[in-house]
């Protein structure tokens, strides 16, 4: 194994840990707002680490660019969907947990 393979493995494991942390936050936090925060932040960072690991293994600049574009699109979609969920929760009168 080369140094690139070790770096890729570390980044993929780190990304998986962030996904696991987001899942734990989704299951453990008390209200929709804190769950959204935990899930979106952890998943975006986790996906960033996974994409970085995959970029290291990409065979061309075009493939690496596609991976980064996918990551940016997921970031945009995650932010948009989280906003819509939080707005709907506010409109339904769901209060922030204190």
Image: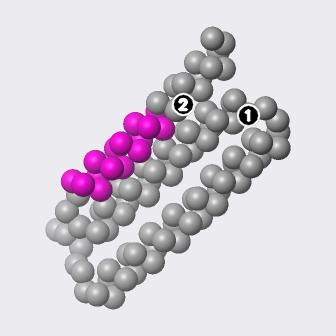
User: Is 92 above or below relative to 53?
Assistant: below
Residue pointed to by mark 1? 58
Q: Nearer the viewer, residue 69 or 96?
A: 69
Lateral position of residue 23 relative to residue 3, left or right: left
Which mark, residue 89? none
User: Is 87 above or below relative to 14?
Assistant: below
Badge 2 crowding class, 10 Å Cα cut-off, few under 14, some 14 to 19, many 20 or more, is many
Q: CA distance from mark 1 to mark 2?
A: 14 Å
Measured as percent of width and height from the top left, residue 93 is found at: 25, 86
Measured as percent of width and height from the top left, residue 36 is found at: 36, 63
Mark 1 lies on a secondary structure that is: loop
Residue pointed to by mark 2? 11
CB within 8 Å, label 1 to label 2: no
Secondary structure, magenta segment, majority class: helix
Measured as percent of width and height from the top left, residue 69 is found at: 71, 54
- Residue shown at the point (29%, 56%) measured from the top left: 26
- Residue shown at the point (56%, 39%) measured from the top left: 50
Mark 1 or mark 2: whose residue is earlier in sequence: 2
Quarter location, residue 82: bottom left
Lateral position of residue 88 relative to residue 9, left or right: left
Quarter location, residue 89: bottom left
> What colour scheme has been applied to the protein in the rendered image?
one colour
Check if residue 39 falls in the magenta segment. no
Quarter location, residue 92: bottom left
Measured as percent of width and height from the top left, residue 73 is found at: 64, 60
User: Is 63 above or below relative to 80?
Assistant: above
Badge 1 crowding class, 10 Å Cα cut-off, few under 14, some 14 to 19, many 20 or more, is some
Check if residue 20 falls in the magenta segment. yes
On-image quarter of the C terminus: bottom left
Q: What residue span does the magenta drawing correspond to? A: 14-28
Q: Most extreme residue toward the left, as rendered? A: 98
On-image quarter of the N terminus: top right
């Amino acid at each position: 194994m080369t140094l690139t393979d070790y770096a890729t493995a570390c980044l993929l494991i780190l990304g998986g840990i962030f996904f696991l942390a987001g899942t734990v936050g989704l299951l453990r936090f008390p209200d929709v707002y804190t769950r959204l925060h935990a899930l979106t932040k952890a998943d975006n960072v986790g996906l960033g680490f996974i994409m970085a690991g995959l970029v290291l293994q990409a065979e061309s600049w075009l493939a690496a660019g596609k991976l980064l574009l996918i990551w940016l699109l997921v970031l945009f979609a995650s932010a948009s969907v989280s906003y819509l969920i939080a707005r709907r929760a506010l409109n339904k009168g769901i209060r922030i947990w204190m």
